[in-house]
Image (cartoon, helix red, strand yellow):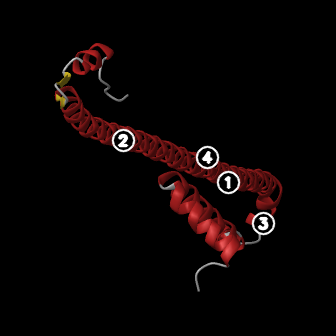
Amino acid sequence: MSLIKPSWLESWLNTLNWDILGWHIYVGDALEAAIDFVLGWINALAEWAASVVAWLDELRQEIIDGFNVFVEWLNELWNSLTNILDTWWDSLAEWWNARIEDVKDLIAVAVQWVNERIDDVMTALDSIAVWWENFTTEVLPTLASKFDITAAFDEFMLKWQDLFNTWEEFRDSIFDFFSNPFDWLLDRFTDWFMGGEK
């Protein structure tokens, strides 16, 4: 918007132009030229100021737009990172749950093995009880007259020495399991799947 002279000022300046006895005194025109000169500078300065203000407003808008783009980029980066971490955490949880199931399976196998060994021992003890009953009621009375009882008992004990040694190993294995299950399972895992220590 440019500054212009009001119409009343132009009318008043025209009244300052005189023709006196052939002399032309144009005071109004000189004053009007001076006012136009000053108004030209003022209008040029105003246009320059308006262009600077427009440039500053455009710069401000570009800064705001740049900041918004930066914030959006940060949000996308944050979302990407949280998605990566969530995926990693889910994968880790799945892996950990699978390892827990593996350990539970190993414990179930170990418990089954212990139960089978206990059943084997109980069967062996039942067999020994039947044998002992048979020995004391039918065999020993006939042998006592023919052999020395001590020698017969020693011979009997030698025949079952391997069973007693196996029983002691089994008993020690059970004690080891209940005193430290993790080491017991690790030793069995090493023996079963890796061939034991050389």
Is the C-beta separation of discs 3 and 4 under 8 Å?
no
Q: CA distance from mark 1 to mark 2?
A: 75 Å
Please state which amino acid type lies under the numbered disc 3.
Answer: Leu
Q: Nearer the viewer, residue 68 or 163?
A: 68
User: Counting residues from the N terminus, which is met first, the one under dot 2 or under dot 3?
Assistant: 2
User: Counting residues from the N terminus, which is met first, the one under dot 1 or under dot 3?
Assistant: 1
Crowding near the residue tagged with mark 4, few <14, some 14–19, many ≥20 C-alpha atoms within 10 Å: few
Please state which amino acid type lies under the numbered disc 1.
Answer: Asp
Q: Quadrant of residue 57?
A: top left
Q: CA distance from mark 1 to mark 3?
A: 57 Å
Residue at 69% x, 71% y: name it: 192
SS at circle 1 = helix
- Residue 5 coordinates in the image, percent (x, y): 29, 23
Give the residue at mark 2. 51
Between label 1 and label 3, give the one nearer the viewer: 1
Give the residue at mark 1. 102
Crowding near the residue tagged with mark 2, few <14, some 14–19, many ≥20 C-alpha atoms within 10 Å: few
